[in-house]
Image (cartoon, rainbow, N blue to C red):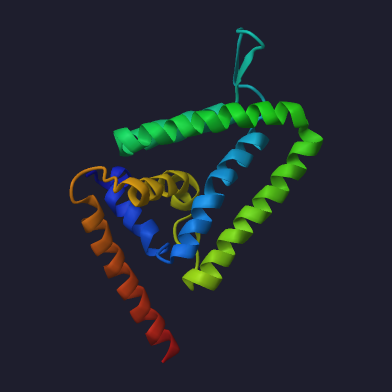
Amino acid sequence: MGNGLMDLEKHFAFYGAYHSNPVNVLIHIIFVWPIFFTSLILFYFTPPLLRLPIVGGLDLNFAFLSVVLYAFFYVSLDKRAGSLAAALCLLCWFGSQSLAARLGFSLAWKVVLAAQIFCWGGQFIGHGVFEKRAPALLDNLSQALFMAPFFVLLEVLQIAFGYEPYPGFQASVRAKIEADRSKWKSSQQKKSS
């Protein structure tokens, strides 16, 4: 358990309160990582902050800096799941940089735009049609953009393996989600009265 920025339980409960419908959850599991990946494709074209003279050269640009920040943050939230998320971030970086180099900027931005519209559109449909609640990004943009890849991974680990960062995590998060959803439903009823 952490506090403030490092309070995984609080952040995951906030995320969970906006993602309780199974279809919406599945949509997010499918679309969140491609949004991250395609963002890295565009970031490939940012100027290098530093160029390492290794085979083929390695540009330490905004894409690399982003991946390092995401990876360190995820590991700091939870060592085990965060390490897996960090590895996925690095794989996304390698793959996106390779694809971006092959596509070139004039084609890459079109591919990224199409993928981003499709993935974001799917998520908005998930919220509007299935969740019936506005996306979390309207209430907390930084959490939606920065923590979403880790949260969908954590969700998959919980569903598939019953993973918990520590004993009692899921029960505590579920209680917080239920409290938040009850409060939200109550406010919705007051608005419609």
Q: Would residue 182 be seen by someone viewing this image from the given angle?
A: yes
Q: Which is nearer the eye, 139 or 53? A: 53
Q: Position of residue 56 (x, y in %)?
A: 67, 11
Which residue in the rendered view is the most extreme toward the bottom? 193
Quadrant assignment for the N terminus: top left
Write the residue at 26% across / 42% down: 165
Where is 127 relative to 161, above or below? below
Write the residue at 56% across / 60% down: 123
Q: Would residue 156 appear left or right of 23 to someone viewing this image?
A: left
Q: Position of residue 4 (x, y in %)?
A: 29, 47
Number of marks present in the image shown: 0
Q: Which is nearer the eye, 190 or 71? A: 71
Where is 128 relative to 39, above or below? below
Q: Which is nearer the eye, 178 or 10? A: 178
Q: Which is nearer the eye, 106 or 190? A: 106
Quadrant assignment for the C terminus: bottom left
Q: Would residue 131 appear left or right of 54 to someone viewing this image?
A: left
Q: Position of residue 120 (x, y in %)?
A: 61, 56
Q: Position of residue 2 (x, y in %)?
A: 24, 43
Quarter of the view holding residue 76: top left
Q: Would residue 136 be seen by someone viewing this image from the given angle?
A: no
Write the residue at 36% across / 48% down: 160
Which residue in the rendered view is the most extreme toward the front? 160
Which residue in the rendered view is the most extreme toward the right? 106
Write the residue at 49% across / 63% down: 24
Where is 129 relative to 117, above or below? below
Quarter of the view holding residue 85: top left
